[in-house]
Amino acid sequence: MSLTHVTASSSGPVSPSSSTLRPLPLGAVRLVGGYWGDWQQRNADTVLAHCETWMERIGWIGNFDAAATGEPFEHAGIEFVDSEVYKLLEAMAWELGRSGDPQLADRYDRLVERVAAAQDDDGYLHTSFGRSWQRARWSDLEWGHELYSMGHLIQAAVARLRTAGGGLLVDVAVRVADHLVEVFGRDGREAVCGHPEIEPALVELGRATGDHRYVLLARTFVERRGRGLLAPIEYGQEYFQDDVPVRRAEVLRGHAVRALYLAAGAVDVAVETGDAELLHAVERQWEHTVARRTYLTGAMGAHHQDEAFGADFELPPDREYGETCAAIASNMLSWRLLLETGDSKYADLIERTLYNAVMVAPREDGRAFFYANTLHQRVEGTVPPEDAISARALSSLRAPWFEVSCCPTNLARTLASVESVFATMTASGLQLHQYGDYDVDVTLPDGTPIGFTVRSGWPYDGAVVLTATTATDAPVTVQLRVPAWADGAELETPEGRRAAPAGQLVTVERTFVVGDRLTLTVPVQARLTVPDPRIDAVRGTVAVERGPLVYALESTDLGQDVGDVVVLPEVPVEDHGAGDVRVAVATRSVEAGPGLPYGSPETETTFVDTVRLVPYATWGNRGPSTMRVFLPTV
Amino acid sequence: MSLTHVTASSSGPVSPSSSTLRPLPLGAVRLVGGYWGDWQQRNADTVLAHCETWMERIGWIGNFDAAATGEPFEHAGIEFVDSEVYKLLEAMAWELGRSGDPQLADRYDRLVERVAAAQDDDGYLHTSFGRSWQRARWSDLEWGHELYSMGHLIQAAVARLRTAGGGLLVDVAVRVADHLVEVFGRDGREAVCGHPEIEPALVELGRATGDHRYVLLARTFVERRGRGLLAPIEYGQEYFQDDVPVRRAEVLRGHAVRALYLAAGAVDVAVETGDAELLHAVERQWEHTVARRTYLTGAMGAHHQDEAFGADFELPPDREYGETCAAIASNMLSWRLLLETGDSKYADLIERTLYNAVMVAPREDGRAFFYANTLHQRVEGTVPPEDAISARALSSLRAPWFEVSCCPTNLARTLASVESVFATMTASGLQLHQYGDYDVDVTLPDGTPIGFTVRSGWPYDGAVVLTATTATDAPVTVQLRVPAWADGAELETPEGRRAAPAGQLVTVERTFVVGDRLTLTVPVQARLTVPDPRIDAVRGTVAVERGPLVYALESTDLGQDVGDVVVLPEVPVEDHGAGDVRVAVATRSVEAGPGLPYGSPETETTFVDTVRLVPYATWGNRGPSTMRVFLPTV
């Protein structure tokens, strides 16, 4: 079912010139409510303005105004805060493409003008480098994030190009990209940026503009990596992925966001240049990383110190870093691999990661965010002030803004375009990978118009109902992903009921008439999950999952700290619905002596009661608490 | 059995003006071989020259020469490398006090002259701050380590004062201290140093010189702490112990070395000013910290990122930081509390910490060192180059030197004075806290001369034989520590055999004649240790200890990676001597699917054989390996 070079003129964030599964054109999927519709609306109503207000208030947007004057100024924030403004612009562009909201359009235009005014004559654009009183351009490729920031500018421009066909920001980004081709192209400076991001950005710009030079520059950056072009640092060259060439690496390693952005860019390069070796290298890296370096929530990154992957099976729940941006980056990678290969395992990981590792970040009102995401909160935190900037990794509750605040804007652009990963098409077929309440209408590459309403209580309920809204002249293929966790799923079609095996797409071939229904019923009842015994940090524990959701025990429900609790796995999990999942727990009292905690202590467990668990992504919304996902059984 | 104000004119590193147990005068304990005699000799022969050569080669000593010229220079190393030169001088002073080696004396004198030449006219001495082209004095109290470095200078001077009665370095240090009294005293600047160390140093200088102003300044620094005088940082004020006043804190927290140095200084201040409240606060903090935040080896510090204590029971073996300096600092604190209270639990922790958490640092040849000390090495490391500076926390094998190299010089001063914590006295009694091969000769405060040879194969063998070398006119008390782990110990005296209960001092009252023997026999056979179930990271594991030693499994002995191994605790540990402790192990094969490692995988264990464990402190001496102390049982 491979297609080649079917181009969609206007698609979402990723638009390969060829792929097994094709992204749908923009607007083909329209959220109409439910989990994702509500969150996308909250993003439009709250998150975008929250990010803009903060960045205005603390001078991150003002940096562009100051830079435009040509006079010396004190730069606000760390050197890569330009990128936060760009991610906000990307989010706004996707949102505008959908809503066309004139007030948002005004805000967008004014912001773009301020950014554009800071661009140098030769196309270079960065508020922290290059002026006579600043550090020289490209003088700190290890930490300066110059190309990283420009990469996000380019991504924002691509979003505008695809939603509005062009405009000032697109002109700015093309000048930036042309400048980069000159500086870093084949005959230019042999260097890479310490933080990947320019690679996928340049490929998307190449795809969106048809200018292959940008793809070639991205390829150059990918190929240069792993050759020690970056200066040694304390965390080792693997922090930068500059230890091993991308096509020779076996696993993702080092700084998680860096590793995942680079891998996404490498897939883009491989796809656009027909480089099967490079593609298969990244597929292998994804497999190894998922099987040995990924949390139950899909989160990646086990170390606080270097925000990095740990060794295989080094997955501590309490010291998990699990940066929100790494979860977003993981989905960027999985989506590219899903398009290229058509393998449902990538959509499975996207689902797990979205519902648990990404959506744990925002507070339910969309005005505060986690940056790091622990699976075990040992100490009740304090509520961060609503009007102050928080430290990124220490906040034990969601904070409104951070001194390095990459996650809120990354979440904003993700929510603004989240439906782009819900469905794909082949020449004469439609694939639904993620469920919710949405309408889908698309003309397939073979010319057949096709349309459905999709209704589902996902992620809380396992029924997905498709109703045809367009009649088809001839048989078309509709495929629905059955998650790998969904044992016992069934599909009901006008022809009858049949089993829908887990971990693959279930296929319907049919000439649809309006009103035809397809119902996928997926059992979501709560289940106990036992971790691989090689994950030392969670030996002797179980976790509870229900459908796509990982659950957590909070002290708020237990009535005491979650530290001294034991679950009784011989008592089944009670599932009275997504909001009332319960496990039987005992408390443990330990008769420890006064000395070190290693004296084979006497312990006694006392049955308490069944206690309610909450979806992990919602923990911490009721004030300070202690929390754990992995529940001790011994 | 409390004594007040018995001053010993010349003692080791800690000399309270009053205490329950009195430190012995310098020279009263003389190592004659065995574990500690050998290591102290290796320190004298190898470690001191190793540190001196490195610091000469990379310009850390040269900083003083350059500073003395008055001309601008490029400072070598991080801003607190002065302190490494001072710790070396302290180590040299203790060693010279014992050996008087003329070559070492020459090296010492030349080094002191170079240091002294860099002192400013007003007494200030630091090579990184205060010159017109440098940052201003005291301009970065959070990170500048100015007072910290001067504290180590003062400690070095105290060592010289106690071993040689005075000299150039003492004059230098007194001028430094007088300058500090002026700048930071009651009417001076209300500030503290981001890194404690000046506090115990000033108290010791006060003790050694009799000038109480230094004690009062130390008290001022201790009292100022916990009041937010240091600027906020990302890790929170607890990193600096500037979150809660010392006398109100319940537990040690934040950066481990900082916390322990501060606590040691607080005990010193409490003892010298009769401040029982402050003393009891630190006693409580020690108890809580030992019971909930201490590794089996005695190591402290669970976080790499901020080199800090974790929360209660957050003690990951793989991501243990366990900085060598924190273990040394822990012993500084425990020794002070042992002297003040006489409670054997402090000597127990000193023993555990010395043999496991401190002595794991040096490679067996004394030319390479661990900085961080993991209890679970997941990936075979590579051998660090012998001629290059290593990153402190990433080295998976001992490295010759680090870019921040506090641990080698700290180890050098510890080894050079290690016998100072072996024994104490009361008015008419002698207490032996640590065992080995040494002679002890001292005149007790009541005027009675007393002397013994002490011979023991400790830490490998549990027999300790004391032979009287001096007759006493009247009955004296000799007390021997019976470790808390030593169930079934017995003491044989000329009167006969009796049980010696674990965890306390066993007492002999006797009028000794030359040749009288006391034999303490302590069972050291290998034992399984089960951790407190609240330490989540080691649930479902056991450790093996033998006498005072913690043991470890290395891949070198197993013949494969230690990751997939299970011990069979129903098979007893085989103990054929300290060098041949064996456990029965099985390997586990896991039938994991291709996806995430949480799918209740099928596992199969296959009995392999018994495999030899090694004392943890010796791991990594046979080349790259994987290693674990906590062995899974499930």
Image (spheres, coloured by chain):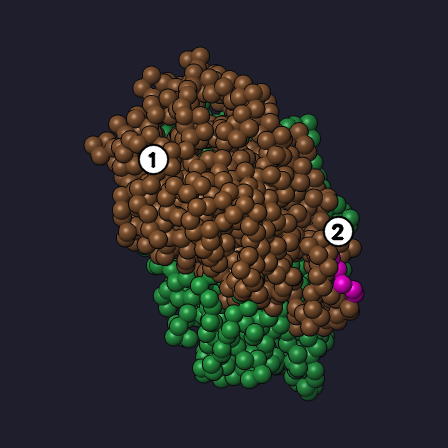
Chain colours: A green, B brown
Q: Residues within 10 Å of mark 2 (few under 14, many from 20)?
A: some
The total number of labels drawn is: 2
Rendered-image quadrant of the C terminus of chain B: bottom right
Front residue (pair B433, A167): B433
The reply to whether residue B193 is in sight is no
Closest to the observer, A509 or B94:
B94
Q: Residue B556 carries which label?
A: 2
Q: Where is residue B609 in the image (x, y as percent from the top left)?
A: 78, 64
Q: Point out residue A572 in the picture as x, y percentages from the top left corner.
A: 56, 84
Is residue A176 found inside the magenta-colored segment of the image? no
SS at circle 2: helix
Chain that bears disc 2: B
Q: Which badge, 2 or 1, is on the more N-terminal residue?
A: 1
As shown in the figure, which amino acid type bears the numbered disc 1? Arg
Kindly identify the residue that appears in the image at 42 percent across and 55 percent down. B343
Residue drawn 38% across the image and 33% down it:
B9
In the visual, does B444 lie left or right of B302? left
What amino acid does circle 2 point to? Thr
Magenta residue check for B611:
yes
- In the picture of the structure, the residue carrying the numbered disc 1 is B207
The segment highlighted magenta reads: B608-612
Disc 1: which chain?
B
Q: Which of marks 2 and 1 is in front?
A: 1
Depth order, front residue of A309/A134 = A309
- Establish whether labels 2 and 1 are both on one chain: yes
Picture coordinates of residue B592, whole percent (x, y): 72, 67
